Amino acid sequence: MSGRFIALAAVLLAGTLAAQKYTPPRTPDGQPDLQGVWTNVTITPLERPANLVGKQFFTPAEARQYEKDTVVRNNADRRDGGAQADLNRAYNDAWYDRGTKVVETLRTSLVIDPPDGRIPRKDQGAPAVPAGFGRPPEGPEDRSLPERCILWPTAGPPMMPSFYNNNYQIVQAPGYVTILVEMIHDARIIPIDSRPHVDSKIRAWLGDSRGHWEGNTLVVETTNFNDKTRFQRSSQNMKLVERFTRTAPDTVMYEFTVDDPSTFTKPWTAQIPMKKTDGPIIEYACNEGNYAMEGMLAGARADEKKAAGR
Amino acid sequence: MRKKLAMSLGIAGLLMAAAPMWAHHAFAAEFDAQRPVKLRGTVVKVEFINPHSWIHMDVKEADGKVTRWMVEGGSPNALFRRGVTKDALPQGTEISVDGYQAKDGSNRANGRDITFADGKKLFVGGSNPDEQPNAK
């Protein structure tokens, strides 16, 4: 009974937070000011886990329990589970920065629509094996895009938390908003005017973004992705709409809607609060020290030798 | 009711613990789970670079021979943000590394568990449920 009451209170509180009237500061040229360094770090999963079906919000007590369990589960300092699991945890936990809290709305998934918190995939099967996995790589091009420092699947657009470097700097100038992403260190320059997207023949890893203001909300539409970006296994025709709203001095509420009829049965939306954090954004010069690429290719050659010797 | 949820969360946790984690790259492609190594030696050089840091160390074998090893860590960015720099590991520092050797047999290993000689963890300040170091 009391649990239910707390759950109801949490829902009401979340609604109040979203609806509260906060007037963001303005830039010198009069745009709502989104500038600063923000983090979207959270342990709330993108999709609602199977054991939380039907539960949109945690109660505060459930949230604390979930946080405790998740932090223990994620902790890379644990050494159980056998050698392979141990190796997959890679290195000590201090290198990671996965966060320790669920989102402040106490939602159980970042996906808020559909209400079941699940991505409405047409193909509910297992994810396709990413390029480079499942056969021995002959060169760097056979390894995955993140390993080649080209694209990080959560660095965006759209931007989602990962296990470290979840930091973003927003800079505004007349006619433009720029978002510097720490992971893989791309800077996305978004024109804020009514110019059309580039020709559909022109395709880009990060797509082509165009922004406009709807009241205090920055709305950014991105199209023209290439056929290798494949956010959540989408096609190059994916249309992405992101919404940035400063809802408090220390919060930009970030929502994104993904539309790709060939991959999803309907558009779906996720919501992630971005919280003010200390700068600066630290450089992530990924190719500078990617000795691991050489190590992985050497590993593949060693595997081949071993197989041939048997 | 709450107890039941906590229990089911706990069970989910156990199930998910078996799923591999995703570092910047697949560590299983580079290192061999069947070649665990324990290294004890002194720091020669630290490269705090992306996507992964590397600690170079000299390891004295039983016969007195010194072997140079390279030990792979994570992205240094999270450490920088917590105020940890290369100064935490000056040349000559004695460290112990528990890891897995490179598949090709070269003297490279992942720094699965790195500690100072006295057993203290090298970099303290990972996940703590009571604080979120990154948020203001």
Image (spheres, rainbow, N blue to C red):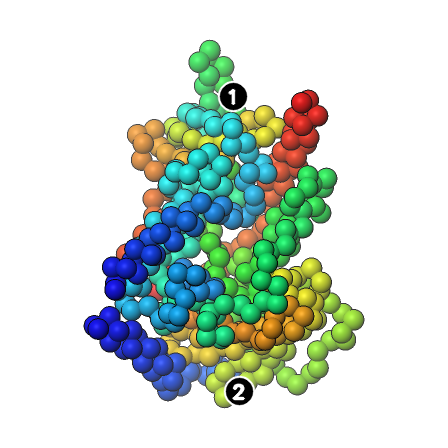
- Position in image of residue B103 (x %, y %): 59, 30
- Position in image of residue A224 (x %, y %): 70, 71
Residues packed near mark 1 inside 10 Å, few (<14), some (14 to 19) or many (20 plus):
few
In this view, B118 is above or below A292: above
Q: Secondary structure at mark 1?
A: strand
Q: Which residue is mark 1?
A: B67
- Position in image of residue B72 (x %, y %): 51, 37
Can residue A278 be seen here? The reply is no
Can residue A284 be seen here? The reply is yes
Q: Residue at x 63, y 51 (%)?
A: A129
In this view, A195 is above or below A155: below
View extreme (right): residue:
A201
Q: Residue at x 53, y 55 (%)?
A: A283
Left/right of residue A252 with respect to residue A220 in the rendered view: left
What label does residue B19 carry, if any?
none
Chain label for disc 2:
A
Marks 1 and 2, how far apart at CA: 63 Å
Residues packed near mark 2 inside 10 Å, few (<14), some (14 to 19) or many (20 plus):
few
Q: Residue at x 60, y 73 (%)?
A: A265
